[in-house]
Image (cartoon, rainbow, N blue to C red):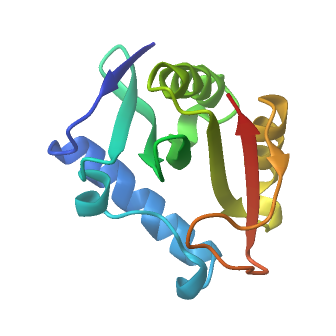
Amino acid sequence: MKIVVDDLFGPEIAEFLAEHVSEMRSLTPLESKHALDLDDLRKPDVTFWSVYDDDALVGCGAIKALDTEHAELKSMRTSTTRKRGGVASFLLDHILAEARRMRFSRISLETGSAEFFRPARKLYEKFGFTYCEPFGEYRLDPHSVFMTRTL
């Protein structure tokens, strides 16, 4: 597998992210959906990576700078056919290394509280994330769980 910084202008990644947003909308009320759209993911404070296995897009993830020391993990997704196949761990390890390289000292995330999101929460726990209060502009929400870790 290889990980590349993605400019988000290709049709394949646009479709991949559209599926992500559609799935999140089917699981979470609109007011509790925090996935960024393509325009927001293209902003200068976001770095976005795509994961390829040969020529197949199998995952993606991003970090958004909240300030000079704190970043947020965004848009983590693995293709349906590759879930629980190591793609997310491979990518998350890369993102954490890049966040350290960018000199962030903390990285946080928001994910869903529903059972569907349990594998994601377990992955984040495995990588040292702990549960925390809402950060940035987030507010308490029964559909959201917040996690953080130092780098």
Given residues 87 and 121, the one toward you in this image is: 121
Q: Position of residue 81 (x, y in %)?
A: 55, 36
Quadrant assignment, res 129: top right
Left or right: residue 18 compared with residue 20: left
Residue at coordinates 53% horizontally, 65% vertically from top-left? 23
Given residues 55 and 61, the one toward you in this image is: 61
Left or right: residue 18 compared with residue 90: left
Residue at coordinates 36% horizontally, 49% vertically from top-left? 16
Residue at coordinates 55% horizontally, 23% vertically from top-left? 100
The answer to whether residue 2 is above or below residue 149 is above
Q: Quadrant of the N terminus?
A: top left
Quadrant assignment, res 97: top right
Residue at coordinates 56% horizontally, 45% vertically from top-left? 70
Q: Quadrant of the C terminus?
A: top right
Quadrant assignment, res 36: bottom left
Left or right: residue 1 compared with residue 50: right
The answer to whether residue 81 is above or below residue 37 is above
Q: Position of residue 51 (x, y in %)?
A: 41, 26
Given residues 73 and 19, the one toward you in this image is: 73
Q: Position of residue 59 (x, y in %)?
A: 47, 35
